[in-house]
Each structure stands twice: as structure tokens, then as C-alpha cells.
Image (cartoon, coloured by chain):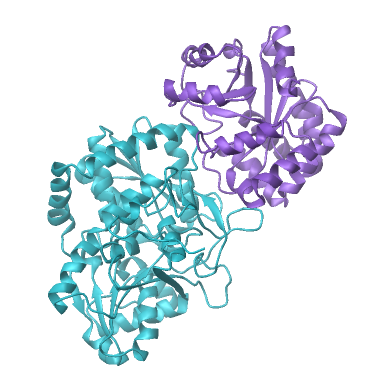
Amino acid sequence: MSLKIRKGVPLIDQHDKNFMYGGKFGGNFIPETLKKPIDDLTKLFSKLRVDKKFLRERDYYFKNYVGAPTPFIKLENLTEHLGGAQIYAKVVSEANGGAHKIYNATVHCLIAKKAGKKFIIGDTGAGYAGKMLSMAAKKFGLKCKIFMGAKDIKRQRPNVEAIKKNGATIVPVTSGSQTLVDAVSECMRYWVANNDTTNLCVGSTVGPNIFVKICAWSTAQISRELIKQVKDEFGKIPKKMKLLNCVGGGSSAMGFWNEFMDTDAELIGIEAGGPKKSKLHAAPLTNDSKIGILHGAAQYVIQDKEGQIGTTESISAGLDYPGISPLHCFLKDAKRAKYTTASDEDALKAYQIVSRLENISPSLEPSHAFAEAIKIAPNLKSSDIIIVNSCGDSLKDKDIIKKKLGTYTR
Amino acid sequence: MKSKIALAFQKCKREKRPALITYTVAGDNNIQNSIKIMNAISRYADILELGFPHNTPIADGGQIQSSTHRALKNGIKLNNVFQIVKKFKKNNPNKPVILMGYYNLIYQIGEKKFLINCKKSGVDGCIVVDYPFPENKNFAEKCRKKSINFIQLISPTTSKDRMRKIIRISHDMVYYISMLSTTGGKLKVSAKKILQNYNKIRRINPKKNVVIGFGITDKTIVALKSAQGLVCGSFLCKTISNSLKMGHNPAEKLSKVVYNLKNKIL
């Protein structure tokens, strides 16, 4: 049965009384101890999001601290090289800190201040969510702890250094696959034990409902800027426009698409296809995974028949996650967005092509989206518009890229 | 007819002592040992909780995670968990067994089939860590219809109003989480404070059997013995870990530890 998206209602609010989207995604599958803190946060957020003073504060920091708006540029060389659709990029990596994670981190710190909390914790995969949270925590005078898989600590060194420099503590997570999935679990466990003094910032549009909401509400800044930039560029929203975004947990795609929900824009999410010969893909939407419960929410998730969560494999730490935002599950089932994958190899190649031809150098996450653009653009007409969210900079991946390609150029 | 869980509490009440409730993970460190452990400790324990392992637990501390990891590494499946209970129940038909775990495993097999398997193997109750009230209301009702106890949890963060609602729909046993912690945390709140909160819950309905869990070891158990029941889990999982490390027989070791715990609350 196909689900329906209501027009004129923010996507994050289209849940039922059990906080489920389409009756089957999301919700709050949480230990009793977290009921109250999540309830408190839910109430506080619903007040703040309509509070004019708070909105002014948010906008002030987005403008003066994050740096809004981030550039919207045409990739002339890439367009010419591919010879089909017109390709544009929203260069979100120009935001302070170098990625979209700054929006969620800033909003969570503002909320923590309003809640009178002195500590904030968060999970991180690629290290961006951790880096941004540590930055924002420093800015707003909060003590910060970042939970990160031991495997990710090794492969995302530049962001690890940044987190430390910002004065945050890194808690290495050595359980399970030692990647994002375990970092989120460990972070939630810490919150179970410390929610009286500490606020939690879940790093993506995953987790119990309120975290999905706050994150998507924060990253929506990207499309608020973009819709204006698109209208400035084309005079209106072009008829045939595709918005391409990589999808791990799904926070940057949610932010990139939010304001275009009720338009004709085509929304395409690109999941991590992993190494070409591997089957351990972090692509629950493309691979038709079953619905399961992970980190407090029902979602399509990579798991075995019993319900044990599966391991994933991707060159991109930020996409290496077995689950996916309930919002994306909702968009998939409502057929509002389409999802596909790009392999590690395709992403690396896309990184190379874009970095060589253009002034931007996307990290391995958005390189997945660029890979799809490179694949489809030649078969499209010049009246077709492709916009890619370049939501991270390759600098953080320089070790991986060097190892895989021999050299790193930016 | 009274449930075996209710009868176990009745017996303890007569003997003027709290019920001793143990928690071990099914299949830790393998199916055979798991049954041996249950058989050994059931001489002293009044109710046995048995964890069905999940690899992404969001409320378990290190000790239980280690036990879970061992069990999963040995290939334990939900079906094996039911087999373990069935085998145990063959020799101990009146000893209540409560399954404890995370909702995804129930969700995948389906609530109905899960409960049919519970019934077939002789499970007396279940605790689902990440399925709180009121979301769990339907499932709790399905349990009741099958005469299986659904055990509601209450924590220090639970409001009075919520407590009342939870107690009202609860079955024969309610589980009070002693402190803000994952399982196996160090007791960071005084026993006095824990009992104060505990008694608040008791006063709402004195007829309900309320037990205390989290942070209970051979050191902390005495101070809490005025409760109706005490759950000891991580301490036992740690004992299994240690005895495996030392090459000891975990069943023998655990039997001694549980005997010792029991003696402290007599």
C-alpha cells in the first residue's frame, strides 16, 4: 500500500500519536528511563520552534556563525564534460566546519542552553557530527563528549584532531563493528545513565522521533537557502530539476529536500553501495531491507532473519550505517523520493573528476551523489537541471583517498 | 488461577524475605552451559530472568554485553532460547522464567508467534527493554490473554502520574530501575534514596509485587532487602566471564554466588 504525503504540512510533523510516519516508521522504542528526558525535549522543542525570539537567535547564528547562505554554483566544466544536463552544486561544505552537521549541532546547543544543561554528548561516524558538535559546544560554553567507533577514529583522523582541539573528549567505542552504529548505541547508553545533567545530540535524522525532528528542522536551512537561490538563478523552480543527495542516516538529504517537498523537483537519494565485489552494503532502501527497530525507531534496516542488526561496509564512514531515517523510509514508500546506490569505486572516481574539473572537492559522502550525476547527466537534455548537495569536503578523507589512489589532490 | 510468578512472591512473603531474581543471558556461553547454569542457580533463585540476545542493545552495560556477545558468537537463535526454557522447565516446572530482551527480535518473528512459542516452552513472563508504556499496551494485553506476565518498568525519571498509569495496567510484577544507569552500573544512589522511591511506587498499590534491579551485587543487596524482590544480573554475567577466563565451571561458580546472595537476604 502506498503512503501519502500531506501537502502544506512539514514532513517532520506528519506522524501519528505514536510518533510513527505512515503508521510504520519512527516512533519511540526506548527504555523507560529515557521517556521523561525525551518528553521534556519534545515539549521544549515544540515551544521553541514557534518562539520568535528563538528563531531570531537561530537565524542569527546560522548567518553569523555557520555562514548562511552557502554558495550555489554552476559546475560549468563538469556540465561541459558530461554533455547533457546542467549540473549545479549547493556547496554546503562552505558552512563553518565544512559540512551540514553544523546546523543540527548549533540548534542542539541552543536547546541545551535553554534547558539549562551544561553537558552535551553526540555520536559521530565520519567525524563531522562530532567535530561540529564540539565546535558548537565550545562556542556556547557546554562541556562535550563525542562517541566514535574505534575503526572510524583510525580512518577519519583530521576530524578526530579537530574534535580534540575543540576541547571535547572522544570516547572510543570498541564494541561490535566499531563504526557509527556502535557509536550511536554507546552514546544512547551514556545518555540513559546521565540524562539528568546531559543533553543528547543525535548526529543524524535517526533515533527516537524528537531527534529525527530536531535534526531535519535544523538542516532544512539548506533548502530554505536553495529555493531562493534557484528562483534567483532560473526565475522560478525549473520543471525538470533533480536534487541529488547522498544518504547515510539521511540528515543532509532531508535538509536539501525539505522546502521542495510540495514542488515538482525530483528527489534522488544515493546510498552507499560499498566495494563492488562486496555484499555488505549500507543501502537498506535500495536493497529492500525489512523494517526493524534500530536506535529507538522503526525503519528499513539491514538485519538478519532473527532481527540481529547487520554489518555494513563502505569507504565512506558517514554512510556506513545499517539503518536510515524514518523520514526517508516514509518518502520511499510514498514514492516521493527515489533511492539508488553508488559503489566505493564510483564514488572515488566521481571525487577525482569533480576535484579535477571544478573548484570544489567533495568528500566521499557527496561523491556518491556526484557519481549518480555523472552517470545520468549524459543521457539528459540541457533543459534538465541537476543539483548536487556537496555537503562535505574531501580534506577529511585524504588518508583514505591517498591509500586508494596513491595521491590526494584537492 | 494465580500465576507462578505471583505464587513465587507469595512464598517469599510468607518466609518474610525478598524474592531473589537472577538474570543470565540465554546461550552464555553455550546452550548446554546455559541450561546447567539455570538448573544450578534455581535451587536458590525464586525467579529466573533469561536474556534473549540482541546485538544492538541500547540499555545494557559492559557485563551483559559481553555475555550477549559470547552467546551470539556461538550462534544462539531465538528458537534455541525457547529450547533452553523448555528443557529447564522439564526439571523445574514451577520455577518462573521471564524472558528479557529488545523489541526487534519480537517484531521480526511477530508478536503472535513469539507468544505462542513462549507458551509452548513454558515462559511465565517477559520484559521488553525498549518497548515502554503506552506503546506496549497492546502487546501487554496480548500477553495477559495468554496468561503470560508482561512486566512493566518504572525508573527514577518516571513521573508520579505516569507511575499510577503503569501500575494500573501492570500484571503480577513491576520492575523498578534503581538509578539512572545502564545495567551493571555502580550503585550511585544511596540504598535509602532508592527505597524511598521504591516505597512511593508501593504505596500506589500495595498489592503489586515491585522488584528492584540495576546495580545489585553481593555488596549492595543487604541494604535493599526490605524490597519485595531484587534482581541480580550484571554481577552474575561478570561471574560467568571471570570463571570462563579462569577455566572454571561457570555453573558451579554461579551456584555458589547465588547461594551466597540468597543467604544475605534471608
* Residue at 51% across, 38% down: B135
In which quadrant is the C terminus of chain B drawn? top right
**Residue A209 placement, left or right of A75:** right
Where A38 sits versus A222, above or below?
above
Q: How many marks?
A: 0
* Residue at 69% across, 6% down: B16
In terms of depth relative to the viewer, which is nearer, A298 or A102?
Answer: A298
Where A328 sits versus B4, above or below?
below
In the figure, the shade used to draw chain B is purple
* Residue at 42% across, 38% down: A191
Where B7 sits versus B169, above or below?
above
In terms of depth relative to the viewer, which is nearer, A326 or A165?
Answer: A326
In terms of depth relative to the viewer, which is nearer, B156 or A123?
Answer: B156
The image shows residue A208 at horizontal and vertical percentages of 43, 45
Quarter of image, res A235: bottom left
* Residue A130 visible in the current orientation: no
**Residue A352 placement, left or right of B99:** left
The image shows residue B176 at horizontal and vertical percentages of 54, 23
Where A355 sits versus B200, above or below?
below
Quarter of image, res A267: bottom left
Chain letter corresponding to the colour cyan: A
**Residue B133 placement, left or right of A78:** right
The image shows residue B133 at horizontal and vertical percentages of 51, 33
The image shows residue A194 at horizontal and vertical percentages of 40, 33
In which quadrant is the N terminus of chain B drawn? top right
The residue sitting at the right extreme is B91
* Residue A322 visible in the current orientation: yes
In terms of depth relative to the viewer, which is nearer, B11 or B164?
Answer: B164
